Image (cartoon, grey):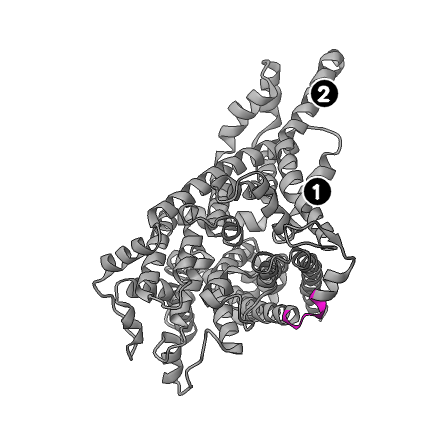
Amino acid sequence: MASAKISSNKKSMSEEKKDMISGYLYIAPFFIIFAVIGLYPALFSMFLAFQKWNGLAPMEFVGLHNFKIVLMDPLFWKSLYNTIIIALMGTAPQLVIGIILAFLLNLSFLRFRNFFRVTIFMPYITSMVAVALIFSVLFSNHESSLANYTLGLFGFDPVNWGASEWGTKIAISVMVFWRWVGYNTIIYLAGIQSISNDLYEAATIDGANKFQQLIHITMPLLKPFIILTVFFSTVGSLQLFAEPTVFLGASAFTRDEAMTVVMYLYRDAFKLQSFGTASATAVILLVIIILFSAINTLATSGFGRKKKGA
Amino acid sequence: MSQQAGSKKFSPGRIFIYLFLSLASLLSLFPFYWMFVMATRPSAAYNSIPPTITPGNLLVDNFQKVLGAIDFFRAMGNTVILCISVTLVVLIISSLAGYAFAKFKFPGKNGLFIAILLTMVIPPQLGLIPQYYLIAEAGLLDTLQGVAVLFFLNPLGIFLMRQYVSNSVPDELIEAAKLDGCSNFRIYRSIALPIILPAFATLGIIVFTAVWGEFLWQFTILRDPEMYTIQVALATLSNTFNIDFGMIMSGVFWATVPLIIIFLLFNRLFISSITEGAVK
C-alpha cells in the first residue's frame, strides 16, 4: 500500500480527499437530524427554563423564578421521592435475582436451559403500556383481585393498590421488576459466558461449592456488566412515565401517590400550559440523572474494588 | 468425574435449583396466562372469589367490544407502519455513519464519534416541549411522520454498526474494489452492505421493539384517535371510570399475541440482539 502511495502520489491525494468528503457525507444525516430535533430542543429547553410562557402569550424573562417555583413546590419533591422509591424497589432486587438466575442458567448440568431462558426473558417483549394494564387487573383495589386474594390466603388485609401511598408504589415496582428482570438476566448471562470455564474448574478442584464460586468468581468478574445494568436501570427508572400513567388511568395526573418527575413535567407542560416551569423541571431532571448515574456507577465500581481488597 | 456428576443428579441442591428456575418461569409466564383468562371472561369474572383462573368462552365477544371502543386494526396498522419506516431509516443512517467511522479517515473523526456517544446521555424528556412545538410548527401533529422523526436519532445504532463494520469488512476488499474503479458509495452499497446484513437484523430488532413499546412521545404527539398507535389506543381503554376488564385484557391480548409469535419464532435472534446491544 505504501509503495502504491509513493508511485501515484497525486492519485492517492485525490483519493484521500474523496474519502474525507464521503466520510462527512455519510455521517451528515445523523448530525443534521440531531441538530434540528435533538440539540436545538435541548438548548431551547434550557432557554425556556428562564422564561414565563403559556404557549401563546409572548415569553417573559423571569430569571431563576421557575426553578424557585418548582423547588418550592411540595408536589415536585413528592414526585422525586416517589420516583426514587419506585426506582429502588423496582430495580435493586433485579440485580440480585438477575445474577442468581444467570448463574443458575449457566450451570453445566442444567437441562431445559433454553426453555428457562426464553420464558424468563419473555416479559421484556410486552410493552410498558401492556404491562401496566395487565397489572392493573392483577392489582385492582377489589378484595377479589388476585393480589388481594393471595394476600388474604396469608391472612393479610386487602390493599387499595390504585390509591394508597404504598399500594401504588409496590404495584408499579412489581411491574418494573417483572418486565426487566429477565432482560438483566440475559445481559448477566452474556457476561458469565465470557468468564473462562477454567476458573470454575480450578475452584471446584480446590473444593469451592457453587455458592462460593458465585461470590468469589462470578460476581467480581461480572463487575463491568453490573455497572452497565446499574447505569441503564438508574437512567431508565428516573424517566418512569408509562407505568404509573396507565396504571392509574383517568386519575393519573390528579393524584400524588405515584406521580413521577416526568409525570410532573408532563402535567406542567400539557395539562397546565406552564412551559417555563416544565422546562425548569426538565433541566432539574437532567441534573438529577447525571448526578444519580454518576453516584451509582461510582458506588458499583467501588463496591467491586473493596471486595477485591478484602 | 462423570460418575461423580451422575451420582449428584438428584441431590437436594439440584432439585432446589430446578424448583427456583421453574418458579421464575412460572412468575414470568403467569401474567400472560392471566391476560388470556381475563380476555375470555366477562368483566364480572374478576369479582369472583376465589379468582377465576381458567379460560372462558368470550374471546370473540370481548374483542368485539374492543373494536367498538378503539379502532384496533387501524392502530395496529399505524404502529406497524411507524416501526418499519423508523427501522429502515435508522438502519440506513446508522450503517452509513458506522461505515464512515470504521473505514474513512477524516479530521475530527474521533471527536465526532465521542460526541455521538455523549448524545446517549441526554434524557429524551429534556427537549420534549420544544420538540412538540417543532413538530406542531411543521404541521406534523397527529401524523406518523411527526412521531417517527424523533426516533431517527439512534446513537447506539451507529456504535453497533461501527463495531460490526470494523470487525467484518476487510480493508483489502475495499482497496481491491477501489483499484477496480469503484466509487465509495458503490463499495458501501455492493460490498459492505451484504456483509453487514446480520447486524441489520440485530439493530432492526432493537429499534423495532423500542419504537413499538415507546409511550411518552407517541402520547404527546397523537391526539386524534384516527392516528393513535396501539400503545396510545390501549392506554385509552382504561381511561374511563367504568372499567371493563374483559375488554381491556382482550385488547392487550390481541396487541401482544403478534409480538409473542414473532418472539418465539426468532427468540435466539432476539436474545442475542439484546446482549449485543447492551454489552458492546
Q: Quadrant of residue B82?
A: top left
What is the residue that sits farthest to the front in this orientation? A57
Nearest to the observer: residue A100 or residue A151: A151
**Discs 2/1, front:** 1
Disc 2 on helix, strand or loop?
helix
Which amino acid is tagged 1?
Ala
Image quarter in which the N terminus of chain B is found: bottom left
Q: Is residue B155 magenta?
A: no
Query: In this figure, which residue is indicated by the disc labeled 1?
Result: B115
Nearest to the observer: residue A226 or residue A58: A58
Q: Which residues are magenta?
A: A70-75
Label 2: how many Cα within 10 Å (few below 14, some 14–19, many 20+): some
In this rendering, position of residue A22 left or right of residue A243:
right
Disc 1 on helix, strand or loop?
helix
Relative height, residue A223 to residue A208 (above, below):
above
Q: Dot 1 falls on which chain?
A: B
- Can the viewer see residue A1? no
Nearest to the observer: residue B113 or residue B56: B56
Residue drawn at point x = 70 percent, y = 56 percent: A283
Query: In this figure, which residue is indicated by the disc labeled 2?
Result: A17
Locate residue A184, reporting x and y percent.
52, 59
Locate residue A225, reporting x and y percent.
60, 57
